[in-house]
Image (cartoon, helix red, strand yellow):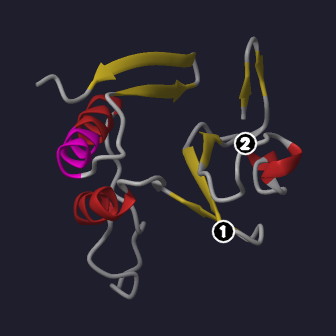
Amino acid sequence: MHLEGSRGRCDALPSPPSLHTPLPHFCPQAGLDDAGAGAVYGYDSIGSYERSGYGCQGSGKDLVQPLLDNQLMAASPLVLPARPSTTSLSLEQATDLVKTALAAAAERDIYTGDGVEILKITRGGVERELMPLRQD
């Protein structure tokens, strides 16, 4: 969790989100763990959580999730020898994938807004990028 001007511990995220933020319980939360690896926590409506390599939420979720699964998920968690279930991407590749997924959702989902704020979380801090959608 990032609070303006401070850094929280990513491993504190799995506690109920209502302790950290007034957002609904099913909003994903992201940060870096102690090893500097990205961590995304997804929540359901009763507060159960799961750490994963990626996630999405919102009106365009049904359009974005299959694209992310196709680009990021390993063929099967049962593949032997075992391997990570999420494909690693560079920051630039991940940013491009997010932009592509959100642009695609904006074309098909009337509730997806006219712009998106992308927060890139690294050991060096948080970089904010604004991307307009629907420029027609």
The magenta segment: 100-108
Instruction: Specify whether residue 109 is in view.
Output: yes
Q: Residue at x 35, y 42 (%)?
A: 112
Q: Between label 2 and label 1, give the one nearer the viewer.
A: 1
Give residue 62's quadrant in the image: bottom left
Asked whether the beta carbons under mark 2 and mark 1 sit within 8 Å of each other, the answer is: no
Q: Residue furthest top?
A: 5
Residue 104 on the magenta segment: yes
**Quadrant where the C terminus is found in the figure:** top left
**Vertically, is 86 above or below 133?**
below
Neighbour tally class for label 1: few under 14, some 14-19, many 20 plus, Cα within 10 Å: few
* Residue type at tag 1: Asp
Q: Is residue 54 visible?
A: no
Compared to 32, does 65 lie above or below? below
Mark 2 — residue?
Answer: 10
| Residue 45 magenta-highlighted | no
User: Where in the figure is residue 18, as x and y percent of width and height?
Assistant: 83, 50
Left/right of residue 55 with respect to residue 29 in the rendered view: left
In the picture as drawn, the residue positioned furthest to the right comes out as 19
The numbered disc on residue 44 is 1
The percent coordinates of residue 121 (x first, y second) are 53, 28
Tag 1 secondary structure: loop
Secondary structure that dominates the magenta span = helix
Gap between marks 2 and 1 measured at Cα: 19 Å
Q: Quadrant of residue 125?
A: top right
Q: Nearer the viewer, residue 24 or 99?
A: 24
Image quarter hosting the N terminus: top right
Mark earlier in primary sequence (2, 1): 2
What amino acid is labelled 2 in the image?
Cys
